[in-house]
Each structure stands twice: as structure tokens, then as C-alpha cells.
Amino acid sequence: MTDLRPYHAPPPNAPLTAGARFIRGFKRIGVVLGAITLIVGFAVTIGISIDAQRSAERRFESASCMSNLVRTNRVVKMKTYDQAKIDFEASGCPSGPFYYESLSTILSYAAEKPAPLEYTIEPFGYGALATTVMAAVLFYGFWLLGWLCAGFTRD
């Protein structure tokens, strides 16, 4: 029992220097701006990815409708002001995202139905990469700015 020592609280932490406080403040600004960039960037990226998939599905629907017209030997109507452009509405098909494509190009899109999430992967990958890089640049940029302004002091 003589081995027991009385309890002593640990010594208090040393107060931060002015430079360390400055760096900590800039780090916090970088974290907040980086988090905002991540949230907004991923929201925009998801929206763009969903739009790319919907556009591919609409393109397939229009192309398959035109393919059915050609297969059943029905007339594909052209625009009155330009005989090179297909009039989807007059032919009875949704126009989709087609504007100036030829009939052979449109029919090539009817070959295969887009798989679920097939067209979302590429835009999401690029968007996620760009968003993450921008958030990291913001964080490390503000940390570096704080470190430079604090006179190259330790964190």
C-alpha cells in the first residue's frame, strides 16, 4: 500500500502562439470551403449523371420508333423547310435529343437499349474526381496561405 501515489492532474497544455492560431483559423476556413465544394460538386455531378442517362434513354426511344417506321415500310416525313431533317412529330415519334442527324445515324442508336446506369458512370467519375481535387486545393491552399502569413511557424 505504500506504492500508491496521490492523484495529480496532468499539466495544462501550453497556449497556442499567435502564428499557430492564425494557421488554425485558415485551416478551418479551408475545411468549411472544401466541405461546401464537396456538397455542391457532388449534387451537380449527380444531376448531370442522371440527365445523361435520361438523354440516352430518350434517344433510344426515338430511334426505336423510327426503326419501327422503317421496318414496317411507313413513310418517314421530313421537315417542310429542310428536306434533310426528319420531322419526328409528323412521323409520330418523340423527337428526343436528335436535331440534325441522318436517318442511318438515328437507326444506329436503336441497336441496343442502354443498360441501367450505363451513361451515369463516366460523368459521375469525372465530376467526383474534379470535385475532390477542387476541395483539396481549397483546403491546402488556405492552409498554405495561413502558414505563409504566420511566418512559416509550426502548426
Image (cartoon, rainbow, N blue to C red):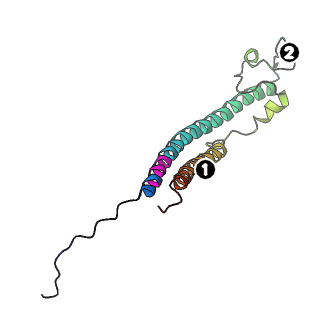
Compare marks 1 and 2 and give the one earlier in the sequence.
2
Q: Which residue is mark 2?
A: 82
Which residue lies at the image location 65% right of the left edge and 46% below the top edge? 126
Which residue lies at the image location 71% right of the left edge and 21% below the top edge? 93
Instruction: Please state if 93 lies on the left or on the right of 155 as rendered.
Output: right
As drawn, 104 above or below 85 = below
What amino acid type should be assigned to the residue bearing mark 1? Answer: Val
The front one of 78 and 154 is 154
Could you say where residue 33 lies in the image, as x and y percent from the top left? 50, 44
Quarter of the image where the N terminus is located: bottom left
Could you say where residue 17 lies in the image, as x and y percent from the top left? 41, 59
Could you say where residue 58 lies in the image, as x and y percent from the top left? 67, 30
What secondary structure predominates along the stretch shown in magenta?
Answer: helix
Image-quadrant location for residue 110: top right
What amino acid type should be assigned to the residue bearing mark 2? Answer: Asp
Discs 1, 2 touching: Cβ within 8 Å? no
Q: Which residue is mark 1?
A: 133
**Which range is magenta?**
23-31
SS state under label 1? helix
